[in-house]
Structure formats: C-alpha cells, structure tokens
Amino acid sequence: MPPPSISFRLVPNVRQGSGRAVGMLGGHQDLCANTLINLKEKDAKYMRYSMDRWSSGIDGPNARCHPFPGTDYFVFKQVAEGHRFYGYLYHPLPKTNPRFLLCVLTTYAQKREDKTDPADLGRVKQWMNAPASKAAISVVYADKEPEKKG
C-alpha cells in the first residue's frame, strides 16, 4: 500500500486544456515524476508536445500516446528513445465538471518493444486504486459545489 505522503501536480510547461489535463504523482520512489522532470531537454520537449496535443483534445497518433482498450490505462511514449510514461485516466470533478478528464502519470519504463509489460500496468493499477492517490489529486482538484446563497 502506498504511503500517505503522495503528492500530485500538473506536469510543468504543459498547456492544460479546459476539458483535459496531464498531471503526475510524486512522493514515492516507484513513481515517475522525477524521471519526467529530469528528462534531457530534447526528450522533454517531445513529451510536452505530445501531452499538449492530448490536453487540447487531440487523440493520438498511437506512436505518441494511446489508451489501453477496455481500461482506464494510458501511455505517453517516445519510441525512438524508449521512453514510456504510463498512467490512468480519471474524472476528478464528478460533481462540478464530470466531463473533465485527467491523465495521472505514475510509472516509467525504458523500452523500445511494442508490447507493454503487464507488471507496468499492475503498478499503474495499484496507484490508481490507492486512497492516497485520490487524496493527493483532490488537493489540486477539489470537487466542491459552490455554496448556494440563500
């Protein structure tokens, strides 16, 4: 079970759309936030562009990012350099903005093969189901309806 000191933040220098955003969990050695933040600039620029496109509503191409059919899992990738950032899709605002979709990055893998290692998706699932993850996201995305004025 992940420790309660998990944090969440939006990926720096990525435009966040009105209907989508990309963030990452941090605070545990298994999480990918430090790897993503410390990519070489050329690789970071490629990943930011892919994330910008997705947050603005553009799905794909699959060479850059894609969901896993029948699941909430998602990956941003740079095949030439072998970077894969796995995460999950989440609706953090079901009461106030139910259409808003957040991609929460959790897991990094370095590989060039097409086939995803099931262990990587298993780690994503652990973080996706962890109460500490949901609590960390709710600090940034508080789903509180405005108080009604009487």
Image: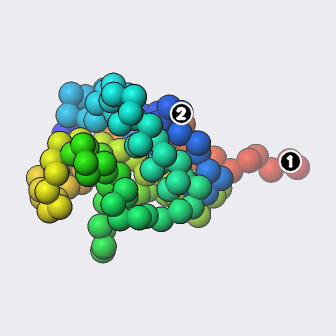
Tag 2: residue type?
Asn
Q: Work out whether mark 1 precedes mark 2 in sequence or the reverse, and give the earlier one.
A: 2
Q: Residue furthest bottom?
A: 70
Question: Is residue 117 rendered to the left or right of residue 16?
Answer: left
Q: Is residue 11 visible?
A: yes
Q: Residues within 10 Å of mark 1 (few under 14, many from 20)?
A: few
Give residue 149's mark: 1
Locate the N terminus and report the quarter of the image it occupies: top left
Question: Is residue 43 rendered to the left or right of residue 100?
Answer: left
Between 114 and 93, which is closer to the camera in this rendering? Answer: 114
In this picture, is 41 found above or below 47? above
Tag 1: residue type?
Lys
Circle 1 — which element? loop
Question: Is residue 147 rendered to the left or right of residue 150?
Answer: left
Between 112 and 97, which is closer to the camera in this rendering? Answer: 112
Give residue 13's mark: 2
Residue 59 at what x, y percent from top left?
47, 65
Question: Is residue 107 rendered to the left or right of residue 47?
Answer: left
What residue sits 37% from the left and 58% below the top?
A: 65
User: Could you say which quadrant of the image residue 90 lies in?
Assistant: bottom left
Q: Nearer the viewer, mark 1 or mark 2?
A: 2
User: Could you say which quadrant of the image residue 26 lies in?
Assistant: top left
Q: Residues within 10 Å of mark 2 (few under 14, many from 20)?
A: few
In this picture, is 49 found above or below 122? above
Circle 2 — which element? loop
Q: How far apart in space, not on screen, are marks 1 and 2 (Cα)? A: 37 Å
Between 111 and 106, which is closer to the camera in this rendering? Answer: 111
What residue sits 35% from the left and 51% below the top?
A: 76
What residue sits 14% from the left and 57% below the top?
A: 113
Residue 66 at what x, y percent from top left?
36, 63
Between 84 and 24, which is closer to the camera in this rendering? Answer: 84
User: Could you say which quadrant of the image residue 68 lies in?
Assistant: bottom left
